[in-house]
Image (cartoon, helix red, strand yellow):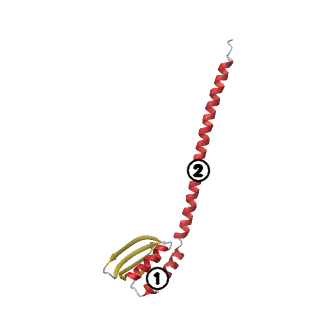
Amino acid sequence: MNKVNPFYILGFLVVILFFTISKVNSARQEFLDAQSSYLQTQRLAQKVSVYKKAYADKTKIKKTLQKILRASVLTKSDLKVEYKKSFVRLTSDSLELPALNYLMGQVLNKTLQIKKLKIKRQSKKRASLEMEIAW
């Protein structure tokens, strides 16, 4: 029977050791990448839930709009409000610019999701408005 050289066995063990170390390092890198991806996804989910709470509360949006529309500047205007299932439509054929300015300032500074906004200037003091706010 032939004897196996111990250097062959030692060389084989060293090759297996390097192969195992490289596999462990690549698996650790994949784990770290997956962990960072998980943390990013978790942060994104928290942001989405905060935005959903702010933008999807139908009663809060309705109260905010009613508060804005009760302003003395807007009660004089011919602003028509239509409540639909998924949005509120504000329309006016002839809205004075101070009323429009007040309305836009209030709507843009609140947490309201504007789906559609169409403003057309009719004269120096009047404009038409069509706006849809989603809930």
Image vertical order of residue 38 relative to residue 128, above or below: above
Q: Residue at x 38, y 79 (%)?
A: 91
Quadrant in which the N terminus appears: top right
User: Could you say whether the residue bearing mark 1 is in a helix, strand or loop?
Assistant: helix
User: Residue sitting at 46 percent across and 87 percent down?
Assistant: 72
Q: Is residue 108 left or right of residue 22?
A: left
Name which of mark 2 and mark 1 comes first in the sequence: 2
Q: Could you classify mark 2 by the number of other residues whose Cα lies within 10 Å: few (under 14), some (14-19), or many (20 or more)?
A: few
Question: Would you say residue 9 is visible in this rendering?
Answer: yes
The residue positioned farthest toward the top in the image shown: 1
Secondary structure of the residue carrying tag 2 is: helix
Residue at mark 2: 36
Q: CA distance from mark 2 to mark 1?
A: 46 Å
Image position, residue 104 (x, y; %): 43, 76
Residue at the spot x=65%, y=26% of the render?
Answer: 14
Amino acid type, residue under disc 1 in the picture: Leu
Quadrant in the picture for residue 78: bottom left
Give the answer, above or below, for where 87 lies relative to 4.
below
Q: Which mark is residue 69?
A: 1
